[in-house]
């Protein structure tokens, strides 16, 4: 049963974090002038379904992997997951603010919006990568026993 749950967990990770990476790279193409703001917003809206459903799959399957909540590393991972969730909600508002702006060029947006979006995306990447690394460490130590 453990291997099935681990498979679901890893599949959910691929769906969620893969979608996050795709949106972030698409955003980078917009910053570089290779895509439009409208295209970026549409990709982000579409990917939200995959990101949130993958995140739900991670949380549900993670419960059945029987994490040891007394370990500081697991506690840190749970904090990172909470950051991912809160930042995901925050990014919804970033997207709304970007959509309401008339300007298409990223660098012509208000400085506050530029800083807000870059900070949110950086936080997202750090939290996702941190949670992935901790998950790998925890799984590796579980398999060694």
Image: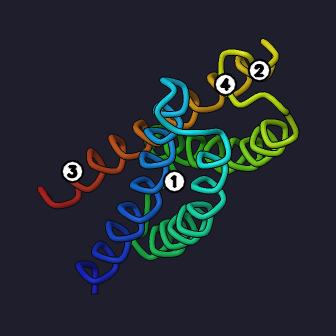
Q: Label 2, secondary structure: give it.
A: loop
Left or right: where 83 falls relative to 86: left
- C-alpha span from label 2 to label 3: 46 Å
Q: Label 1, secondary structure: give it.
A: loop
Mark 3 neighbour density, 10 Å: few (under 14) some (14–19) many (20 or more) = few
Q: Label 4, secondary structure: give it.
A: loop
Q: Are marks 3 and 1 in contact (CB under 8 Å)?
A: no
Q: State which tag comes first along the sequence, 1 or 2.
A: 1
Give the residue at mark 3: 141
Q: Which mark is residue 139?
A: none
Q: Residue at x 49, y 44 (%)?
A: 77
* Rendering coords of residue 91 (x, y %): 72, 42
Mark 2 neighbour density, 10 Å: few (under 14) some (14–19) many (20 or more) = some
Where's the N terminus, which quadrant? bottom left
How is the protein colored in the picture? rainbow
- C-alpha span from label 4 to label 2: 7 Å
Give the residue at mark 1: 69
Against 41, residue 58 (above or below) is below
**In this rendering, which labeled residue sits more in front, label 4 or label 2?**
4
Left or right: where 87 falls relative to 65: right
Q: State which tag comes first along the sequence, 3 or 1.
A: 1
Q: Residue at x 60, y 39 (%)?
A: 36
- C-alpha span from label 4 to label 1: 45 Å
Q: State which tag comes first along the sequence, 4 or 1.
A: 1
- In this view of the protein, which residue sits in the foreground, 51 or 104? 104
Q: State which tag comes first along the sequence, 3 or 4.
A: 4
- In this view of the protein, which residue sits in the foreground, 49 or 5? 49
Give the residue at mark 4: 105
Give the residue at mark 2: 109
Q: Residue at x 56, y 37 (%)?
A: 124
């Amino acid at each position: 049963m453990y291997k099935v749950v681990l498979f679901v967990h890893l599949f959910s990770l691929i769906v969620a974090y893969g979608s996050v990476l795709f949106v972030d790279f698409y955003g980078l193409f917009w910053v570089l002038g290779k895509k439009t703001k409208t295209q970026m917003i549409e990709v982000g809206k579409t990917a939200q379904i995959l990101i949130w459903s993958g995140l739900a799959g991670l949380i549900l399957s993670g419960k059945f992997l029987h994490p040891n909540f007394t370990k500081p590393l697991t506690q840190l991972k749970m904090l990172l997951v909470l950051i991912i969730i809160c930042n995901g909600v925050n990014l919804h508002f970033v997207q709304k603010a970007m959509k309401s702006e008339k300007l298409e060029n990223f660098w012509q947006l208000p400085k506050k919006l530029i800083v807000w979006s870059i900070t949110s995306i950086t936080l997202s990447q750090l939290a996702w990568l941190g949670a992935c690394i901790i998950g790998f460490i925890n799984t590796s130590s579980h398999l060694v026993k």
